């Protein structure tokens, strides 16, 4: 078996997914709006509401990271096997293990977020991004079954005699 070829396949898969994600506005809007801004409200909202004196608390980073990780794990195992090669799934599991370790160490060792918490959340977001980047639900294709879908047909091309 050519293991160099396996590494090349994994690298190409990740690069292809990132390129597709960056070229799909719906995916980017969902990632930034839902996952980053709304998902992280527990991290920054208490500070702006004067509930907390610190913006980035380790327990908030920990719960944010774990909740996003839960969606990553669920999504990873709900997908078809041919869509996520084994090497990509194992890479995700490695990143998940590193993320949990970083987030947990940051939580138990500090009263403020350190590079461990930032690394953990960054890895979590990167994993979500790469896993979901290949999902067709973000493509701008119209379905003929929805109210806006299908091809536009000129009224002149429609059958019928019209009103009499």
Image (cartoon, grey):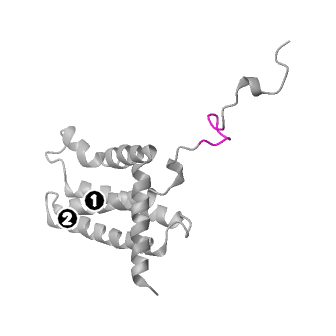
Whether residue 108 sits left or right of residue 134 in the image: it is left
Q: Position of residue 152 (x, y in %)?
A: 66, 32
Quarter of image, res 29 = top left
Identified at 39% across, 62% down, the residue is 15
Question: Hey, which residue is sitting farthest top in the picture?
Answer: 164
Residue 146 inside the magenta-drawn segment: yes
- Residue 112 vs 12, above or below: the answer is above
Q: Residues within 10 Å of mark 1 (few under 14, many from 20)?
A: some
Residue 155 inside the magenta-drawn segment: no
Q: Where is residue 148 in the image (x, y as percent from the top left)?
A: 61, 34
Kindly identify which residue carries mark 1. 122
Q: Nearer the viewer, mark 1 or mark 2?
A: 1
Whether residue 116 sits left or right of residue 68 in the image: it is left
What's the magenta region? 142-150
Identified at 53% across, 50% down, the residue is 137
Q: Can residue 70 be seen in this view?
A: no
Kindly identify which residue carries mark 2. 116
Decide which of 44, 143 is in the foreground and name it. 143
Q: How crowded is mark 2: few (under 14 residues within 10 Å), some or many (20 or more)?
A: some
SS at mark 1 in the image: helix
Identified at 23% across, 57% down, the residue is 59
Identified at 42% across, 52% down, the residue is 21
Q: In which quarter of the image is the C terminus?
A: top right
Decide which of 97, 86 is in the foreground and name it. 86
- Residue 35 vs 3, above or below: the answer is above
């Amino acid at each position: 078996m050519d293991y160099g070829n396996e590494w090349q396949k994994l690298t190409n898969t990740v690069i292809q997914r990132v390129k597709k994600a960056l070229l799909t506005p719906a995916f980017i809007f969902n990632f930034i709006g839902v996952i980053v801004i709304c998902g992280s409200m527990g991290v920054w909202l208490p500070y702006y509401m004067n509930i907390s004196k610190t913006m980035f608390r380790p327990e908030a980073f920990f719960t944010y990271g774990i909740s996003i990780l839960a969606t990553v794990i669920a999504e990873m195992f709900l997908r078809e096997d041919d869509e996520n090669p084994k090497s990509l799934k194992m890479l995700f599991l490695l990143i998940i293990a590193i993320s949990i370790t970083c987030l947990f160490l940051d939580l138990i060792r500090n009263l403020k977020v350190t590079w461990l918490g930032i690394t953990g959340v960054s890895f979590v977001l990167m994993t979500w991004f790469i896993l979901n980047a290949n999902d067709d639900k973000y493509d701008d294709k119209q379905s003929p079954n929805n109210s806006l879908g299908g091809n536009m047909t000129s009224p002149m091309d429609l059958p019928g005699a019209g009103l009499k």
